[in-house]
Structure formats: structure tokens, C-alpha cells
Image (tube, helix red, strand yellow):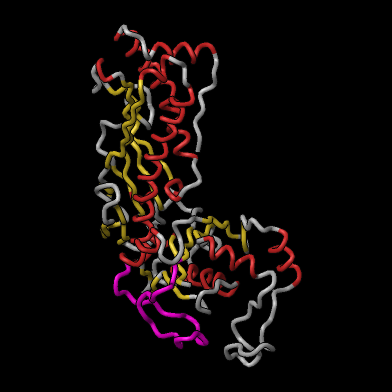
Amino acid sequence: MKITLKPTSEQVELVKAMASKNREVAYEAQTALAEFIGPVLAEVVNTAPTVSNMFTSLQFNADESPSIPLDLYHDITDEDYIQVWSQSVPGGLPTNQVAPSQSELKFTTYTLDSALSFDKRYASRSRLDVVSKTFTRMAQEILLKQEKTSATMVMTALANASTNSEQHVIRSAQTGRFLLSDLNKLFTKSKRINSAWNGGTPAERRGRGITDLLVSPEIVEEIRGLAYNPINTKGADGSAPSGNTNGLAASDTVRDAVFNSAGIPEFYGVSIQEYNEMGDGQAWNTVFSAAAGSTTYADNYSVAQNGGAAQAIQSGEEILVGVDLSRESMIRAVATDSENGAEFNLVADDQFATRQSKIGYYGSLEEGRMIIDDRVLLGLLV
């Protein structure tokens, strides 16, 4: 992420004016720059390839009491009561609210803000690079707060999700390995939890139920390894494969496709999103473990090392998150300014006295995040 101010004559003069000894001139220039940069910061934050932007934006006026009519987001033949996950403070513990699908959902919003300053001499010398990096840092801080809030929401909802008496998290066939069989199992799990209100076949099959996978660099390494490692989870007699003669490689077509696309943007029709925060001992894996607590998850493989027995998260296991982005179930409600309609409110910070020789900016946005249907989330413990 990088914000750059081009050294045009107009922008150079505007930055110089910010350091003027005339306070009115200086403040007017600072305000003009804020009005120009504010929408840019909002666009940068909203288009960054992050977990927070997997949520669908829903704008509302900042002076209103926001709410969502749940019946517009659920099929009329769906179950009478649904589970809604929401947060009251940024980064706080998400709470699960059971509500009728015909009700109006009131939700709580919170403010994410950042304040930065730099010395006036940089403005007087037309150091556009310093001004640019200041706004880049502000966007990064807002984005970091959004990431933590979103990851906490997703991981907590996934760890506790259960539909039709089936948990949304299963285990991989082999410890520490991610195979085609595991993704195939996730597809089947999605079909089972996305049933009709009576437990039968829904009127509309929503595809496979997984459009994106959030994985660690180690899992991407496993996917690349499919080009030369065996992929079978069962031998010819249906038992677990053993020895050097029971390993079966993928077809040449599959292996060539994996080998030729080392970046792995897509695998088996599912988009792969790689995050350093995912993986054993990493931040989001720790959040999932804390949310899961002593919850046990079954192996779902008759030939697995634990014989299908359910157990709590084990040391060394990491979570993969499957998401169905084809449905609007992950909502980010964001307040817009009543005057200019902007999501991100950037203003000149007036806390500095003249003798401090500093120029400051304060930026904030008001938002609230919800998951109104946790059936869009699936997990795989590897």
C-alpha cells in the first residue's frame, strides 16, 4: 500500500501554504488537502486485498440508527431463527444473537481512528514524500485495526458454528498435509449444512458453497507439492495407504496445472488467499484456538489416524478457512458523512500550538461488522 502525491505546481504550493505563518492560510491549506486526500484514503482501504474487504459494504447515514431487515438476506422458506454474530467494540469478543429471520436487526457500530503529525519544516520545503508517507501510515493503521476486528469475527464464528447438528470444522485426512480429498470433503460438508429449512434439498443449490480459501504459506507449499507428491488417502482395499508402493500421484493434467501455476491463485475452482497471519503459532490461528477452547472436532475420515474420534485442537494444528462469497452474509455497515457522503472522515488536527511547529491530521470511520449466516464459513484443521 502506497499513497503518492505527484509534484505538480498546484500540490507543491498547497503543501508550502500549510507551513504559512498566517494561521488562517495554513489551516485553510491543511483543510483543503484533507478534503482531497480523504476519499483517496477510503478507496485505498476499501480495495486492499484483505480479510476485512471480504465483508459486503452497507452504507448508512451517520445520524441514523442503523438496522438490517433480516428477511431480505434469507430465503422465505428458511428456518425461523438464525444466528447473527456481531461486535460492540473493535477487536472485542463477537457475540452470538439468535433472532427470527423476519425481524429487524439493530447493530452496534464503533469508531476506528488514527492521528499523525509531522514537522512544519517538511511542508515549507515541499517534502511531498513525507506528507505522502504520513497518509500512507494512517491508511495502514486503519487497515490493521479492520484486519484484527474482521479476523476475530470470522474465527470466533467459525469455531462455534454448527448447523443441522454438524460442526463446520473438520480435520484433514493426514496430519500436516492438505490434499484434494480434504477440499472434496469441504464441498460435501457445505452441501450438508446448506440444506432447506426442513433438512432436505434446497430449491436453489448455491454452487459448491466455497469460493475462497484462506490459507498459510505452508498450505500453499502443500498445494505446490501436489505436482510431485502422492495424493491418495486410501489404498486399493480401502485401508490407509502404507509403504512405498501404495502412493498414487495425481493425473498428469492436474500435476502439470499445479506445476505451471506456481503462484496458485486458484485451486480446484477455489480462489486461494495466502496470509502470513495464518498457520501454526500465528495470530489468526491463535484467535481460532482461543475461540474454540475445549470444543472437539471429528476427523471425518474412517482411515484417519484417530479413527474418526473427536478431539480438541492439538498442538501443531492449523486452521484453513473456506468462505462462500457468493452470498451476502458477511456485512460491514459503514457510516457516511451527511455533508459529503464520504466514509472516511479526515480533518486537520488543531491540537498543536504555533510553538510546536507541527502539522497534524486526524482520521476516523464508523463501522459495524456482522455475520448474519455462519453457513458461509467452513474450516479444516491440518
Name the residue rendered at 61%, 66% in the picture.
223
Name the residue rendered at 53%, 79% in the picture.
174
Q: Is residue 348 visible?
A: yes
- In x, y percent, where is residue 80? 31, 61
Classify residue 63 as left or right of residue 2.
left
- In x, y percent, where is residue 74? 39, 55
In the image, is residue 19 part of the stretch drawn in magenta?
no
Q: In this view, does 306 lie above or below 109?
A: below
Q: Is residue 201 visible?
A: no
Q: Provide the residue span drawn in magenta.
A: 292-319
Q: Nearer the viewer, residue 328 or 288?
A: 288
In the image, is residue 312 part of the stretch drawn in magenta?
yes
- In x, y percent, where is residue 117? 33, 27
Q: In this view, does 251 lie above or below 135?
A: below
Name the residue rendered at 39%, 75% in the picture.
315
Classify residue 3 as left or right of residue 254.
left
